[in-house]
C-alpha cells in the first residue's frame, strides 16, 4: 500500500537529489582555504583586518578570533553571515548527501528487511522450513517495499510499531 505521504516523500527526495547533483560535483574536502574564507577573501580584496572589523562593527581582536574560529570549524553561522555581509559576499550553507536520498532510503529499507529476515530465517531453519535463496530474496524485497511505506524506517524500534497484518503481508509472520 503506497500512501500519499510516501508519494510526497518520494517526490521530495527526487527533487532534492536533482538539486544536489551539481553540489556533489564540488570537491568535498579541501574546498575551504587553509586560512578560512573570511581571511582569504579579505586578503584577496586587499582589506586589512582592522578595516573589516570596522565594517562589521567589532574590534580587531574579535575579527581575529572570528577568523581563527572559522579555521577551526567552530565559527557560528550568524557570525559568518555578518562577516560575509561586510565583505559583500553570501554565505552558502547546505547539507549535501554523499549519495542520492533515494538510494539511502532504499538501502535502509533493505537493511531493515535483511535484519528482520535474518531473525525469521534462523527460526525457520530450526523448524526445517528454510527458504532457498530465491525465496529469501523475494521475501527481502517484499519486506523492504513494506518498510518503504511505513513510518519509522530509521527508528531502531520500528519493528515494534508494525502490526501483525503488515508483518503477514510482508511474509515474515514474525
Image (cartoon, helix red, strand yellow):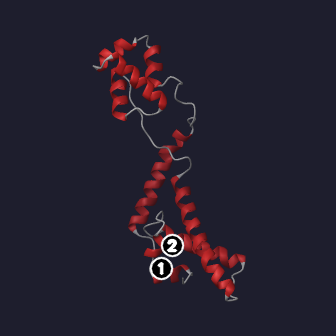
Tell me which residue sits at (53%, 25%) in the image. Answer: 33
Assign a secondary structure to mark 1: helix
Residue 54 at x, y = what percent?
30, 15
Which numbered tag is attached to residue 55? none
In the image, 58 versus 98, the foreground residue is 58
Q: Check contact, mark 2 vs mark 1: CB within 8 A.
A: yes
Tell me which residue sits at (52%, 56%) in the image. Answer: 102
Assign a secondary structure to mark 2: helix
Residue 128 in the figure: left or right of residue 167: right
- Residue extending furthest toward the left: 57
Q: Earlier in the sequence, mark 2 or mark 1?
A: 2
Q: Quadrant of residue 67?
A: top left
Label 2: few (<14), some (14–19) or many (≥20) C-alpha neighbours in 10 Å: some
Q: Which residue is mark 2?
A: 146
Residue 100 at x, y = what percent?
54, 51
Q: Which residue is mark 1?
A: 166
Tell me which residue sits at (55%, 41%) in the image. Answer: 24
Residue 44 at x, y = what percent?
47, 14
Amino acid at each position: 500500500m503506497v500512501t500519499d505521504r510516501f508519494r510526497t516523500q518520494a517526490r521530495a527526495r527526487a527533487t532534492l537529489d536533482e538539486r544536489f547533483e551539481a553540489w556533489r560535483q564540488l570537491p568535498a574536502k579541501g574546498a575551504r582555504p587553509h586560512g578560512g574564507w573570511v581571511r582569504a577573501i579579505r586578503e584577496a580584496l586587499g582589506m586589512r583586518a582592522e578595516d573589516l572589523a570596522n565594517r562589521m562593527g567589532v574590534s580587531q581582536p574579535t575579527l581575529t578570533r572570528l577568523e581563527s574560529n572559522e579555521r577551526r570549524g567552530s565559527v557560528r553561522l550568524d557570525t559568518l553571515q555578518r562577516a560575509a555581509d561586510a565583505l559583500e559576499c553570501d554565505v552558502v550553507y547546505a547539507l549535501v548527501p554523499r549519495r542520492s536520498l533515494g538510494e539511502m532510503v532504499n538501502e535502509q529499507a533493505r537493511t531493515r528487511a535483511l535484519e528482520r529476515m535474518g531473525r525469521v530465517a534462523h527460526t525457520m531453519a530450526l523448524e526445517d522450513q528454510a527458504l532457498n535463496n530465491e525465496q529469501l530474496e523475494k521475501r527481502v524485497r517484499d519486506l523492504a517495499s513494506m518498510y518503504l511505506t511505513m513510518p519509522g524506517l530509521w527508528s531502531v524500534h520500528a519493528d515494534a510499531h508494525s502490526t501483525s497484518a503488515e508483518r503477514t503481508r510482508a511474509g515474515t509472520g514474525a
